[in-house]
Image: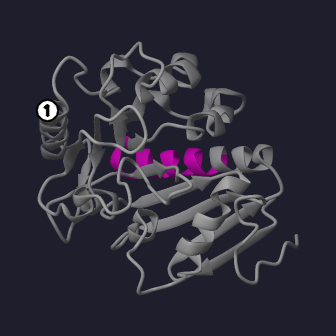
């Protein structure tokens, strides 16, 4: 059970005693969105990030979710990816495959990873082309207020610097408005070459969840959620503001420890 659940500036905050409780509720949340989307559209288009997010999703591989989730209807994408071989330790695809996808009956052709044999620029271009094709066939929904894809769920982590996906503070890609998928070759975190969804795509999703754990992220959570220093250049996570979708933050107690006025009560 969440220690604290609150709405704040359009965001829903869920704060948990520990990562085990967070993981259980995160699995419930994803399974419910999957069920609703399959009932409504016949498919569930979900985009993942890397890092600790994948391990926090691990309960989806356990009972009851491994049997009750309609895995055959899932179409899986990456909100960002490192441009390395799929077998490389830095690959978000490898992380998700080893941690989740190899343990549940997803359909391999529904798993859309990047082309890892080309440049970052070409990989981003190819990935956007794939997404555009799937928007045309409505595997991925389309926003009713712009031409962006409308993913059923985009799952994001956040770094101590406030970055989400591969959108880093002060980087020019934060201003990208036309492309759905862009690339960087100068990531401040290795590896340097990455592809990433742009903010218009993230903010067009039906649901966005930002999942953050650990005390090292507490300062960034405070800056983003409490909107500290509003005139200060925005941290990328602060720019995650779905236009018509739902935004939920899943935080453990350590990550939420510096939030203003947080009351930890059942």
Residue 208, percent from left and from top? 45, 58
Please tell me whether residue 264 is drawn above or below residue 236 in the rendered image. Answer: below
Image check: 71 left or right of 180? right
Image check: 137 left or right of 5? left
Q: Which residue is mark 1?
A: 126
Q: Residue at x 59, y 63 (%)?
A: 249
Please tell me whether residue 171 is drawn above or below residue 139 in the rendered image. Answer: below
- Please tell me how crowded label 1 is: few (under 14), some (14-19), or many (20+) other residues with Cα within 10 Å: some
Q: Quadrant of residue 59?
A: top right
Question: Magenta span covers which residues?
Answer: 28-44
Residue 92, percent from left and from top? 44, 29
The answer to whether residue 190 is visible is yes
Q: Quadrant of residue 150?
A: bottom left
Is residue 35 highlighted in magenta? yes
Residue 60, percent from left and from top? 63, 34
Image check: 62 left or right of 160? right
Q: Residue at x 64, y 43 (%)?
A: 27
Residue 190, percent from left and from top? 41, 34
Q: Residue at x 39, y 20 (%)?
A: 107
């Amino acid at each position: 059970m969440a220690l604290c659940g609150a709405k704040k500036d359009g965001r829903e905050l869920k704060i948990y005693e520990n990562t085990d409780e967070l993981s259980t509720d995160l699995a419930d949340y994803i399974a419910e969105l999957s069920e609703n989307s399959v009932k409504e559209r016949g498919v569930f288009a979900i985009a993942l990030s890397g890092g600790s997010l994948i391990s926090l999703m691990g309960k989806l591989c356990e009972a009851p979710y491994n049997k009750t989730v309609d895995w055959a209807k899932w179409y899986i994408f990456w909100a960002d990816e490192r441009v390395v071989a799929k077998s490389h330790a830095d690959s978000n695809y490898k992380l998700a495959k080893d941690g989740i996808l190899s343990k549940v009956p997803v359909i391999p052709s529904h798993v859309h990873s990047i082309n890892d044999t080309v440049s970052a620029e070409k990989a981003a271009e190819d990935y956007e082309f794939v997404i555009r094709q799937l928007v045309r066939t409505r595997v991925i929904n389309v926003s009713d207020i712009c031409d962006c894809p409308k993913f059923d769920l985009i799952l994001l982590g956040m770094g101590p610097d406030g970055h989400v996906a591969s959108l880093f503070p002060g980087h020019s890609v934060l201003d990208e408005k036309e492309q759905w998928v862009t690339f960087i070759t100068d990531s401040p975190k290795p590896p340097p070459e990455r592809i990433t969804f742009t903010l218009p795509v993230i903010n067009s999703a039906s649901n966005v969840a930002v999942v953050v754990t650990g005390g090292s992220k507490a300062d960034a959570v405070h800056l983003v959620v409490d909107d500290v220093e509003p005139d200060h250049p925005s941290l990328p996570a602060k720019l995650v503001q779905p236009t018509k979708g739902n935004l939920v933050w899943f935080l453990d107690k350590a990550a939420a420890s510096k939030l203003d006025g947080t009351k930890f009560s059942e």
